[in-house]
Amino acid sequence: MKSFFSGILALFIVSAILLLSDISNREKGKDALRQKPTSGTMFKLALVHYVDSPNSEDCEKGIRKALADKKLVEGVDFSLKIFNAQGDIATLNSIAESVGNETWDLVFALSTPTTQLFAKKLQGAKIVFTNVGDPQAAGLGKSYADHLSNLCGISTMSDFDGLIKLVQTLHPRIKCVGTVFTPVELNSVSFKNNLDISAKKQGIKLVAVPANSATEVLDAANSLVAQRIEAFCQISDNLTGSSSAAILKVSHDSRIPYYSFVTPQMKQGAVAVCGRDYFEAGVEAGQMGIEILSGTNPATIPYRNVEKTNYIISLEAARFFKIVVPDQVFKTFPTLTIMKPSSQK
Amino acid sequence: MTLLIGSITIGLILALLALGIFISFRIFDFPDITAEGSFTFGASIAASLIVAGINPVAATALAFVGGMLAGAATGFIHTRFKINPLLSGILVMTALYSVNLHVMGKSNVPLLSQNTLFTWFEDFSNNISGKDAVVNLIGWSVPARDLWTLCFCLLIIIACSLLLFWFFRTNIGTAMRATGDNDQMIRALGVNTKVMIIAGVALSNGFIALSGSMLAQFQGFADVQMGIGMMVWGLASVIIGEALISENSLGMVIAGAVIGAVLFRLLVAIALRWGMNPNDLKLITAGFVFIALVLPGIMKKTKKIKLIQ
């Protein structure tokens, strides 16, 4: 029995340490979240990643750029505290408690699980999300306009029609395209279905092969080649985003051109992208955040997709895949830019 | 204070996981890694049933049953086909990944606007203490519903622990414990150890699935990736508990697993509250576990040295 009390004692000691480190929040509690903090003019911001991924990191860079564009300086005009659950759901819950325990002017939630959890736990805080592919499927609102009153954000839904149209202009007789997707990522499945709809509209068949881990991506890409696809139209998700090099290698080895939705993949050898990318999403989420910081009620801001779409083509990669780039493509896509060959790897 | 209460609540929910891990690893000496699959399995069963309009209590109970089935599958594969326990666990865990996707129909089921066990606790709090009531606790103001949620979780975990304590002292329970301790002896006494292992691993995974279903309802969604890393945390909790409470009696060991799980969450909360570099979080938690494991031994040694002097 003695050792049982020593266990309880340990619990008390650790609880006391936690309370002592939290002493600054005494007599404020959760209610304080609803009031404007009194700490001068410096905005107190939090940013929460769920997992370390290039997409999530690009969003953070974008948010920082949006703040910098408004001449807001970290440490002077705002403080930004970064949390990262490192892919662990229990830690994400602890982070939600930790964030909910303090007063923030604004919380940036990156990724779907983070946003879902914060929507539930942080009902008093103002939240801007991004890196969420399909907010409706994630249960974050009945529609883009009808949503929780303390939450708004930028959905990273890709421009599927745009890419299919671009591919069709470059390959007028194309019949079959392929993509690797990740069944366990909500966004990935939703993107795959949307790409399928866009492709069907143009009479193109989409072959989608699932991959569940980085090692399976290469096999999935090879399986696509075996199914005689004529082009890769790779959707964007966390898994294929971090192992895009594997798909691009298969693409180059088999001389099947690679198109995608992620701008940085141009440097890895993609022929063209139709990028509403995560950096832009971050920039727009940052701008939305600034709007809220200057007094707009998040309830009145509808969710929206990333507005800015970058159409980029690499003539060098097109030559490699023996694609004749018609002049018409520049008429159909007036914003299409040609990537400088020097930046090609 | 809300941070403390929230962390203890999460700790109590994950204590169910620790109890499950404790049964397989400690009572049966069966390194069962089905946990990562059955944790998500419980969450996905509960979430899909709740979305389908089933009563949350029934959904949670069915999650428990689902976990038991998963565990029974692992036990069956191990005993019937003589496959290594680790590999049996890997097989079932891998299979459950697809099963979970089928159960949920997609990779993530939101429960934001659904009635769950935890919205019941909140309703209860609103009825008893008034809506959005705030309680003053030694200077910190705490929402009443957080306190009520904590109380309910505490009740659930105490009930589960007592139930386990009672069960492992019945004839069947004793035979189970003996199976883990000395299977030759108990087989000589006429107990079918294969059945005991299947039942034990089933019970273990039942608790793990229960923990998963509670966490899904607590956080407001079930995600197919939520089981990742859970087994390690559960095992760490069990071992911290053992290091703290060095007695070997059944009741103490069960209490140790629960205390270990709560303590572990508190340590993570401290690491977060101190605002360390987010990239270092896992390094720091690993450090904490190391200290928690080493400290009791060092304390004992210093005591002995004093006695000798």
Image (tube, rainbow, N blue to C red):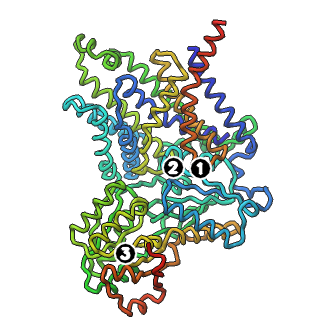
The CA distance from mark 2 to mark 3 is 30 Å
Instruction: Work out whether A110 lies above or below B120.
Output: below
Residue beneath disc 3: A259
Residue B189 vs residue B266: left or right?
A: left
Q: Nearer the viewer, residue A300 or A189?
A: A189
The picture quadrant where one finds residue B26 is: top left
Q: Which amino acid lies under the numbered mark 1 shown in the image of this protein?
A: Pro
Earlier residue among tags 2 and 3: 2
Residue A91 vs residue A242: left or right?
A: right
Q: Which mark is residue B25?
A: none
User: How far from the left and from the top, in percent, is residue A199?
Assistant: 31, 77
Residue at the image point whose x is 58% and y is 34% from the top: B288
User: How far from the left and from the top, in percent, is residue A178?
Assistant: 29, 70
CB under 8 Å between callouts 2 and 1?
A: yes
Residue B208 vs residue A173: left or right?
A: right
Residue beneath disc 2: A86
Instruction: Work out whether A208 lies above or below B229.
Output: below
What kind of element bears circle 1?
helix
Please tell me how crowded label 2 is: few (under 14), some (14-19), or many (20+) other residues with Cα within 10 Å: some
What kind of element bears circle 3?
strand
Residue at the image point whose x is 57% and y is 28% from the top: B292
Residue at the image point whose x is 46% and y is 46% from the top: B216
Q: Which amino acid lies under the numbered mark 2 shown in the image of this protein?
A: Gln
